[in-house]
Each structure stands twice: as structure tokens, then as C-alpha cells.
């Protein structure tokens, strides 16, 4: 039985104000919307999409390393493996039609996340954070990060907080640009929308990858299971539950153009209609659900695969051969970029009949969410890409192009993921 609590609301709104505004029982925090890969006049930004692929590949490479270390390889999905580091400079961007100059990485990837404020330390210092269901650690820039990638970002300084504690060990993720996100390990008080956790493990990072320079966000707060943690410590939400800072080990997302929110401690009944369709989590670290089908209209074009729900990316990834089969059901579709797995289709018939299902309702991806934008006056790019992230030969990763179509619920209490119809 799921308790519908009204504990805390984190609102993702487009307004720019940064200070939390109390409202009723919850606390509303302004969030920035993810912009995706479509520019103001509807064109697909290929460089930005490739940068996202590189980030996703390296993030999940790191997840597999952590999962192997924490749980052993026998917890890998079928065919899962640790891929080599993806290097942005070596990625094939040849299908880019030269419509504009390649940007430097530091100008790239802005707004590709759903972010809001948290506070670290006593007194609390504000950080602007990407909430990521596809990873399990919290990191922010350190005062010791002097590289240009850290300039303009909020930085953690242990000398300005009375509740810091340096721990042994270190934190490190490799990104494919010759740099890492790495730093020492600390604990301190962390507060998100009034939910306060003491002695939360995190890393103030001394080095930041160029993949994160030039972005508004300071760092990442992982919402996946502890077995994916590089710090090998309970992530923020798990600490919040065990310290009694939230009653229910449940959080839920509405991701949309307006009125988006992350709700911690239950579900926000004002945002969805009907029952929540819950499915048990399979596997041991991701928000993963088995028994999925991908449908075009009434026809299942792939069935019985694993799905991982990841708020940290825009893209929906499937194994390359399965994605190829899927696009055979999309009239006029073609490979656009074989190395990064993107496909095109005629802009005059953007599919509005593509859905995922898990034995219940068909959860349809709207045409707007399926379309990443045009690459010519007549050709558009699809949100489903074929790419081996190392997560398994029968495993898909569903980013926000899927999540934007549903109310999604993540329950540690019931070890399940749920979907409901957005109001
Ligand atoms: C979008 O991208 C296209 C192609 O690169 C470019 O011609 C157009 O000016 C861009 N529009 C905006 C608003 O940035
Ligand atoms: C920054 O560097 C100083 C000197 O090496 C060290 O004492 C301090 O702990 C570092 N701070 C962080 C947050 O890493
Ligand atoms: C990435 O590729 C560039 C260009 O080939 C190379 O200079 C750089 O060292 C590579 N970085 C890593 C981490 O392999
Ligand atoms: C799905 O939508 C596309 C584009 O509108 C259409 O061409 C196709 O016939 C539809 N397929 C099914 C199976 O309904």
C-alpha cells in the first residue's frame, strides 16, 4: 500500500528566482528545464547530442565499474560489460552537415538536465544540481578546483562550514576528453527542499571534465540504488529515509515544459489521474524494469526486454540491432549517424504512435517528444538511438524523451517503478 504523502514538493519551473518559497506543507524550488537538442528554429543540434552520448556512455561505464566492485559481475544484465572510455574528440561527427561551426565543448550541452537548488554545510551553501535517477553519488565543485571548467560555479569550502568531515578515499569518474571528475571524500549536512540529512557522503571535486564546464549546473545528485555508488555510501535519498527525514522511500517526477517537479517522500496526487501502474525492479542498482515491449501503433516491434529509467539523459537508447528493427516500422526512416546510432524520418510524418508497455497500459511518446529536430527542410531525427552503453544486450535506457510522457514514481519501499497518466 502506497501512502500518498504531501511531504515535499520540488517544483521545476522556468522562473529564474533561486530562493525556495514555502508553500503549504512542501517547499517549492525553482528548477531549470532541459532544452534537449532542438534549437530555437527547430533544428537538431548534432554536436550537442554527440556530447550527450559521450557523457551517457562514460556515466554508465562508471556505473558498471561500481556495480562490479560493490556487487560482483554476476549482477550484470545479460551481455553487460565495461566499455572503453568514450572520447568526444574521437567521436564521429561526420554526418554533421556543416550548418554551423563545431562549438567548443565548454559552450556545449547547456540546459541538458533538470536542475534545482540544494544546500551543503552549516550554514548551508547553495548549489545548483542535476537530479539523476541514473547514478548514485553526489558531487559538487571544490574550492580547490582552479580550472576554467569550474569558473563561475558554486564551490564547496570546508573552512566555511562547521559540520564538515574529511573521510578517507577518493572519488573519480573518467570522461572522454582527457579529464576526470575527481576529488576527495567528505561528509556534511545536505538539505534539499527542507529535507535535511546529516553526515551525507559526497565529493567536492578538484577536477572537472570539460563536459561540465560552461553549464549552469554545479554538480549531480544521484537517485539510483546504493550499489551504483562510487563513494560506496548511501546516496542522499537513502540517507534521508534511514534518518527519518522522509517518511516514505518514494520519489516521483513530472518532467514537462511547465509545472515540472520532483516530489520527495511520496507522489503528488494533483499531477496524475488514475492508478499508478507499478512494476518490480529487476537487477541490482538501476531503476530497471523487465518485460517491456516497444510498440508502433498496436504492433509490438520488440518485446520482453529490460528497461532502465534515467532522468539524467534526453535520449532513449536501445541495443543497435533492436533499434534498427524498430525503425523498419517507421515509414521513410534512415540511418543518420551510424556511429552514434541516430536515425532520421520525414518531418511530414513524425510518429505519434510509438509506445513502451510493461504488460499494462501503452505509454505513448508524443510526436513532440519523439522529434529531436530537423537536419534538412524535410528530414527529422528521432529520440530513439542505437548505442551499446554496456548495460546489456537486451537492455534499453529510457531518458526524459520517455519520462516527459508519464508521471514516473520510484519506490525504494516497494522496490518498484510506477507510471501514471499526467493530468
Ligand atoms: C538553428 O540551427 C540552424 C542550423 O544549424 C541555423 O541555421 C539556425 O539559425 C539556428 N536557429 C537558432 C534560433 O539558433
Ligand atoms: C583543498 O586543498 C587543501 C590543501 O591541499 C586541503 O587541505 C583541503 O582539504 C582541500 N579542500 C577540499 C575541499 O578538497
Ligand atoms: C581523446 O582524443 C584526443 C584526440 O585524439 C586525444 O588527444 C586525447 O588524449 C584523448 N583523451 C583520452 C582520455 O583518451
Ligand atoms: C504510425 O504513425 C506513422 C506516422 O504518422 C504512420 O505512417 C504509420 O502508419 C503508423 N503506424 C501504425 C502501425 O499505426
Image (spheres, helix red, strand yellow):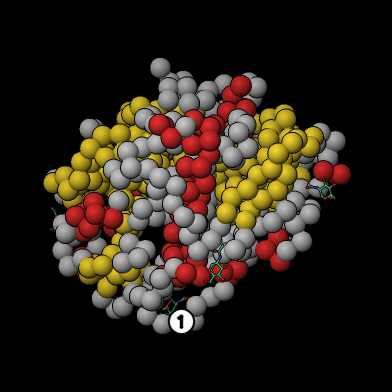
Residue furthest left in the image: 299
Residue drawn at (30%, 34%) of the image? 290
At mark 1, the secondary structure is loop
Is 377 displayed left or right of 268 in the figure?
left
Ligand 3: quadrant of the figure: bottom right
Is 106 displayed left or right of 305 in the figure?
right
Mark 1, residue position: 100
Residue drawn at (52%, 46%) of the image? 62
Task: Classify the position of the N terminus by image quarter.
Answer: top left
Is 232 displayed left or right of 322 in the figure?
right
Residue 306 % position (x, y): 31, 39
Mark 1 lies within 8 Å of ligand 1 (Cβ measured): yes
Closest to the observer, 399 or 340: 340
Residue 338 % position (x, y): 31, 66
Task: Classify the position of the C terminus by image quarter.
Answer: top left
Closest to the observer, 211 or 358: 211
Amino acid at each position: 500500500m502506497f501512502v500518498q504523502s504531501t511531504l515535499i514538493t520540488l517544483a521545476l519551473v522556468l522562473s529564474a528566482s533561486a530562493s525556495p518559497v514555502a508553500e503549504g506543507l512542501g517547499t517549492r524550488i525553482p528548477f531549470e528545464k532541459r532544452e534537449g537538442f532542438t534549437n530555437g528554429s527547430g533544428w537538431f543540434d548534432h554536436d550537442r547530442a554527440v556530447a550527450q552520448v559521450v557523457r551517457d556512455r562514460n556515466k554508465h561505464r562508471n556505473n558498471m565499474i561500481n556495480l562490479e566492485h560493490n556487487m560482483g559481475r554476476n549482477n550484470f544484465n545479460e551481455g553487460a560489460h565495461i566499455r572503453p572510455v568514450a572520447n568526444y574528440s574521437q567521436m564521429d561527427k561526420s554526418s554533421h552537415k556543416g550548418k554551423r561551426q563545431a562549438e567548443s565543448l565548454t559552450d556545449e550541452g547547456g540546459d541538458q538536465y533538470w536542475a534545482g537548488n540544494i544546500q551543503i554545510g552549516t550554514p548551508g551553501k547553495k548549489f545548483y544540481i542535476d537530479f539523476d535517477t541514473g547514478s548514485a553519488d553526489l558531487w559538487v565543485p571544490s574550492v580547490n578546483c582552479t580550472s576554467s571548467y569550474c569558473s563561475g560555479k558554486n564551490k564547496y569550502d570546508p573552512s566555511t562550514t562547521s559540520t564538515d568531515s574529511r573521510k578517507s578515499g577518493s572519488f573519480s569518474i573518467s570522461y572522454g576528453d582527457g579529464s576526470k571528475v575527481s576529488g576527495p571524500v567528505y561528509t556534511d549536512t545536505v538539505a534539499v527542499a527542507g529535507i535535511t540529512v546529516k553526515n551525507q557522503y559526497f565529493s567536492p571535486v578538484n577536477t572537472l571534465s570539460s563536459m561540465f564546464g560552461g553549464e549552469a549546473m554545479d554538480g549531480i545528485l544521484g537517485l539510483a540504488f546504493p550499489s551504483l555508488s562510487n563513494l560506496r555510501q548511501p546516496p542522499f535519498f537513502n540517507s534521508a529515509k534511514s534518518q527519518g527525514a522522509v517518511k516514505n522511500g518514494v520519489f516521483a517526477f513530472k518532467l514537462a515544459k511547465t509545472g515540472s517537479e520532483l516530489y520527495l517522500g511520496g507522489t503528488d496526487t494533483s499531477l496524475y489521474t488514475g492508478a499508478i501502474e507499478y512494476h518490480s525492479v529487476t537487477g541490482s542498482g538501476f531503476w530497471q524494469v523487465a518485460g517491456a515491449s516497444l510498440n508502433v501503433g498496436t504492433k509490438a516491434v520488440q518485446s520482453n526486454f529490460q528497461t532502465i529509467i534515467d532522468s539524467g539523459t534526453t535520449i532513449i537508447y536501445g541495443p543497435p540491432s533492436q533499434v534498427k528493427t524498430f525503425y523498419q516500422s517507421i515509414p521513410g526512416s534512415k540511418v543518420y549517424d551510424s556511429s552514434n546510432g541516430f536515425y532520421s524520418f520525414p518531418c511530414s510524418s513524425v510518429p505519434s504512435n510509438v509506445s513502451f508497455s510493461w504488460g499494462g497500459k501503452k505509454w505513448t511518446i508524443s510526436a513532440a517528444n519523439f522529434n529531436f529536430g530537423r537536419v534538412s527542410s524535410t528530414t527529422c531525427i528521432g529520440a530513439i538511438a542505437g548505442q551499446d552503453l554496456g548495460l546489456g544486450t537486451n537492455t534499453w535506457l529510457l531518458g526524459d524523451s520517455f519520462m516527459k510522457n508519464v508521471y514516473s514514481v520510484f519506490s525504494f519501499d516497494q522496490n518498484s517503478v510506477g507510471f501514471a497518466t499526467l493530468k
